[in-house]
């Protein structure tokens, strides 16, 4: 019987489906760093991995029979794709099923950061609310704002659809311009230069993968080019933003606020960001509504089952 290692607890029936395949399923919260993985590494054929698992060549060398790494995430920056390709290990991810949930969370962070909802919640709980006054706890308007989307894939487009309902003006940047008909349908304008998008947007929301090119794309210099009083939302990957530089931009300008779901060294958060009232912090929950996480788990399981039963997986990553 083929052995499948599952890195942690999955919601829904994905584990049962794997067991019924039938596979020997070894599951451990400690992921690929656990003794449980070490004990079965030499026979494991399928790996259902989490984004907290580092899949590199050293790990692959310990698992010579491995045929597939099925990441329960759309991002695959935890996986050395070249090493997998060199060893003929197929990598899959979970696109589509998490698009709407992630856009929901990004939009929530945007509204929270602009209207200072979490900050207000802390204030009320601390007994700091004295009375209503016209100048109390003012924030930025959400409706009608200029929203800049960095990356215009599935989640970026889902943001644009939400933005229409709020009467926002949407600009997007990515290497390739989308067809005009699609831009019209989504009410989005292409801005070729990232710096121009930053300088002209009331809020920037990041929807791009972490790659060597996007690491610290938002460093001190780029943050300094953002519009005074603007907002940065990151639900993509933490290392796209230099957290120390972000904390500085939140304290000294030009940023008014930020909404972050991802961090450079999760689960650690830069102490200066923890100290900033104008920074909304979420614990990497972009895809964390129950049906979405169940769908991600089922898709990862289906990819493993198909691969080990000789069928092409549903959502393979093609090495660049
Ligand atoms: C992903 O899928 O890459 C998210 O970060 C977790 O849902």
Image (spheres, rainbow, N blue to C red):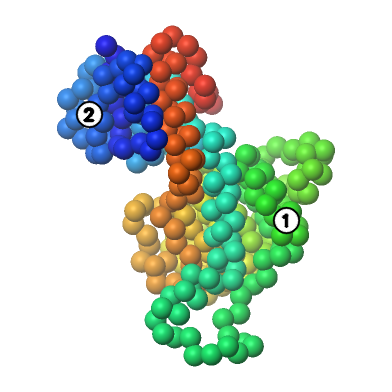
Q: Give whichever of 225, 284 is nearer the camera.
A: 284
Q: Which residue is mark 2?
A: 37
Q: Give the image location of residue 320, x and y in percent.
A: 54, 26
Q: Quadrant of residue 302?
A: top left
Q: Quadrant of the N terminus?
A: top left
Distance Cα–Cα, label 1 vs label 2 = 47 Å
Q: Which residue is mark 1?
A: 165
Judge whether 247 appears above or below 40 on screen: below
Q: Give the image location of residue 133, x and y in percent.
A: 60, 90
Q: Nearer the viewer, mark 1 or mark 2?
A: 1
The answer to whether one can see residue 114 in this image is yes
At mark 2, the secondary structure is helix
Residue found at x 50% / y 14%: 312
Residue found at x 71% / y 60%: 166
For ligand 1, tell me if the residue under mark 1 lies within 8 Å: no
Residue found at x 26% / y 39%: 29
Q: Quadrant of residue 164?
A: bottom right
Badge 1, how many Cα within 10 Å: few under 14, some, many 20+? few
Q: Give the image location of residue 123, x and y in percent.
A: 45, 79
Q: Earlier in the sequence, mark 1 or mark 2?
A: 2
At mark 1, the secondary structure is helix
Left or right: where does residue 206 sit relative to residue 310?
right
């Amino acid at each position: 019987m083929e052995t499948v290692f599952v890195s942690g607890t999955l919601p829904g029936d994905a584990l049962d489906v794997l067991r019924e395949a039938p596979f020997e399923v070894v599951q451990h919260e400690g992921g690929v760093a656990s003794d449980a993985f070490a004990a079965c590494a030499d026979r494991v054929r399928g790996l259902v991995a989490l984004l907290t698992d580092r899949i590199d060549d050293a790990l692959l060398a310990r698992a010579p029979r491995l045929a597939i790494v099925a990441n329960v995430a759309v991002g695959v920056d935890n996986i050395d794709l070249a090493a997998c390709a060199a060893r003929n290990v197929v990598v899959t991810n979970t696109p589509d099923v998490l698009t709407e949930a992630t856009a929901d969370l990004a939009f929530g962070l945007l509204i929270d950061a602009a209207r200072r909802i979490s900050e207000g919640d802390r204030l009320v709980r601390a007994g700091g609310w004295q009375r209503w006054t016209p100048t109390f706890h003012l924030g930025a308007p959400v409706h009608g704002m200029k929203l800049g989307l960095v990356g215009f894939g599935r989640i970026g487009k889902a943001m644009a659809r939400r933005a229409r309902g709020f009467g926002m003006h949407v600009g997007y940047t990515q290497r390739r311009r989308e067809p005009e008909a699609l831009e019209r349908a989504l009410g989005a304008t292409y801005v070729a230069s990232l710096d121009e998008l930053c300088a002209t947007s009331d809020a920037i929301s990041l929807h791009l993968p972490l790659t060597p090119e996007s690491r610290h794309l938002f460093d001190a210099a780029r943050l300094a080019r953002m519009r005074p009083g603007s907002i940065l939302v990151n639900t993509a990957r933490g290392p796209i933003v230099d957290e120390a530089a972000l904390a500085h931009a939140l304290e000294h300008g030009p940023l008014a606020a930020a909404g972050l779901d991802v961090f450079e060294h999760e689960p650690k958060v830069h102490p200066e960001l923890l100290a900033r009232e104008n920074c909304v912090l979420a614990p990497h929950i972009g895809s964390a509504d129950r049906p979405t996480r169940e769908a991600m788990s089922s898709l990862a399981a289906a990819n493993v089952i198909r691969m080990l039963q000789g069928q092409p997986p549903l959502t393979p990553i093609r090495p660049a």
